[in-house]
Image (cartoon, rainbow, N blue to C red):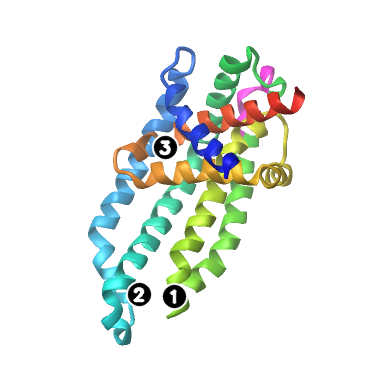
């Protein structure tokens, strides 16, 4: 649990980085993208929540509505915000790569070696390709999660399963920026997160909480990129020492 709490603290530390000189200019575009998409997600939730709840809750379970309704509400919240986060990350992947590189330079004094002479077009191709690979991985996990959500009785476990999946996915999503800048591929990034599982889950939990809080969720993406970069830099420093 110590490493889990460290991961949450790593996430919180991202707030102190996004306003530093040399970093602020890389925050603007991801912030605009995140704000637009999350505003859309909030609008959809406000318009469709009741209709979705009526469809998901079978009539014969209406007597348990007081208990099941909050669980379904949390599940829908997780699904919508996680889906919009995937879209936001796909669009902003190249910008997040540059944001992460600038944070690493601020923290360590130098950019990742792979980023020093990498032309813009290569950064775009590399990051978008990595984002598509991650999205396919996440979508494969969505199939059993979706089944768990719609099957009566056992779907009471759905919010907990979605929470774990969201925390794990957010950790992979945002550690990809600093680790991808260092030349690591998707399977290597997954292995890295498995080797630092509790700290990564702590980071992912912090990101999930940010995405769930109105207004604060607009800052979630740049804060998460900064936080993941700081976390991986700390782990690298501890490993090397």
Is residue 162 toward the left or the right of residue 34 in the image? right
Point 65% across, 35% down: residue: 126
Name the residue beneath numbered marker 3.
220
Question: Does 11 appear above or below 22?
Answer: below
Disc 1, SS: helix
What range is drawn magenta here?
115-124
Percent of width and height locating residue 178: 62, 30
Disc sitting over residue 225 in the figure: none
Relative placement, left or right, of 18 versus 181 is left
Q: Main secondary structure of the magenta part?
A: helix
Q: Quadrant of the N terminus?
A: top right
Q: CA distance from mark 1 to mark 2?
A: 7 Å
Q: Residue furthest right?
A: 240
- Callout 3–callout 1 Cβ contact below 8 Å: no
Image quarter for residue 16? top left
Task: Find out whether residue 75 is within the magenta segment.
Answer: no
Tell me what residue is drawn at x 36 percent, y 66 percent: 71
Distance from the alpha carbon under mark 3 to that under mark 1: 29 Å
Image point 43% across, 72% down: which residue? Answer: 156
Q: Which residue is mark 1?
A: 150
Q: Are marks 1 and 2 in contact (CB under 8 Å)?
A: yes
């Amino acid at each position: 649990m110590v490493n889990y709490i460290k991961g949450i603290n790593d996430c919180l530390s991202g707030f102190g980085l996004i306003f530093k000189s040399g970093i602020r200019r890389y925050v603007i575009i991801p912030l605009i993208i995140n704000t637009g998409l999350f505003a859309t997600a909030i609008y959809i939730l406000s318009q469709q929540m009741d209709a979705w709840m009526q469809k998901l809750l079978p009539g014969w379970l209406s007597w348990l509505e007081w208990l099941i309704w909050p669980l379904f509400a949390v599940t829908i919240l997780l699904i919508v915000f996680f889906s919009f986060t995937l879209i936001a990350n796909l669009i902003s992947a190249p910008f997040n790569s540059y944001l992460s590189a600038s944070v690493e330079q601020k923290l360590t004094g130098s950019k990742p070696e792979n980023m020093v002479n990498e032309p813009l077009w290569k950064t775009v191709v590399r990051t978008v390709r990595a984002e598509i690979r991650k999205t396919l991985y996440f979508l494969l996990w969505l199939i059993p999660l979706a089944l768990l959500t719609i099957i009566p009785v056992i779907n009471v476990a759905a919010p907990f399963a979605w929470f774990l999946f969201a925390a794990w996915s957010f950790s992979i999503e945002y550690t990809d920026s600093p680790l991808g800048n260092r030349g690591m591929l998707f399977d290597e990034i997954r292995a890295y997160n498995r080797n630092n599982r509790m700290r990564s889950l702590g980071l992912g939990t912090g990101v999930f909480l940010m995405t769930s809080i109105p207004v604060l969720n607009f800052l979630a993406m740049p804060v998460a990129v900064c936080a993941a970069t700081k976390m991986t830099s700390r782990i690298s420093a501890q490993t090397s020492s």
